[in-house]
Image (cartoon, helix red, strand yellow):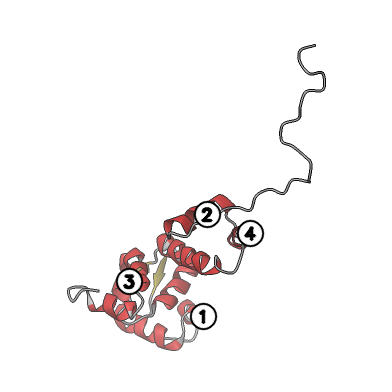
Amino acid sequence: MSPRDPPVMRRLAGEDPQDSELLAAAPKLFKDLSYAVPIRALLALSEKYGGTRIYVPETPSKDSLLNRILDESAFRALCDMCGGERLDIPKAERLRARLRNREIVALARSRTARAIAIKFGLSMRCVFLILAKEGIRRRAPPARMPPGSRLVQPMKTGGTT
C-alpha cells in the first residue's frame, strides 16, 4: 500500500495485500460505504438484494428489511450515512469471484481438483485455470489403465484383407 491510497483501502487491506485486491474489485458503492459498514455486511446485503434498489430508513427500526440482513452496528452505520435515500445495490459478481478464487487456492493444498470443482459447481478445467493464474501448477491424475491393456490394438490379420 502506498501513502497515496485512500485511507479505507489502507484500513481494509491491513497486513494482507490480497485484501486491497478485493477492495479494488468491489463496486463503487461498497468502496464508499466501507468507511462505516464492513465489507462482509455489504456482501450479505448484495447477496440478498443485489441488482435492486432499496430504501434506507433515516432511523434504524426492527421491522426494516435491512435489519434482517445486517447486524445492529452495520445497520445503524448505514442509516447514519444514507438514511432517507434509495440505494442501487450492486451484484458484486467480480468481488464474489475473487473471494471464490481465493478459497479455491486455499483448498488446493488439501483437496483434489475434482472435489473443488464439485464443491463450487465448476469444471475441473476451470479449477486448473484459476490455480494456474495464481501460479499453482497441478495436473489431473493420469487415467488408470488395467495392466496389459493398450491404447492401440494391433491388427489381427496383420495387414489388409
State the SS at label 2. helix
* Residue ID for mark 1: 68
How far is mark 4 from mark 3, CA to CA?
Answer: 29 Å
Q: Amino acid at mark 4?
A: Ile
Residue holding disc 4: 118
Q: Helix, strand or loop at disc 3?
A: helix
Give the CA distance from mark 1 to mark 3: 29 Å
Front position among marks 1 and 4: 4
Looking at marks 2 and 4 on the same chain, the residue that comes earlier in the sequence is marked by 4
Sequence order check: which comes first, mark 1 or mark 4? Answer: 1
Which residue corresponds to mark 3?
Answer: 20
- Nearer the observer: mark 3 or 2; the answer is 2
| Viewer-proximal residue among 148 and 41 | 148
Rendering quarter of residue 59? bottom left
The residue carrying pointer 1 sits among few (fewer than 14), some (14 to 19) or many (20 or more) residues within 10 Å by Cα, namely few
Kind of residue at badge 1 = Arg
Q: Position of residue 52 (x, y in %)?
A: 43, 63
Q: Which mark is residue 128?
A: 2
| Residue 35 location (% of width, % of height) | 30, 80
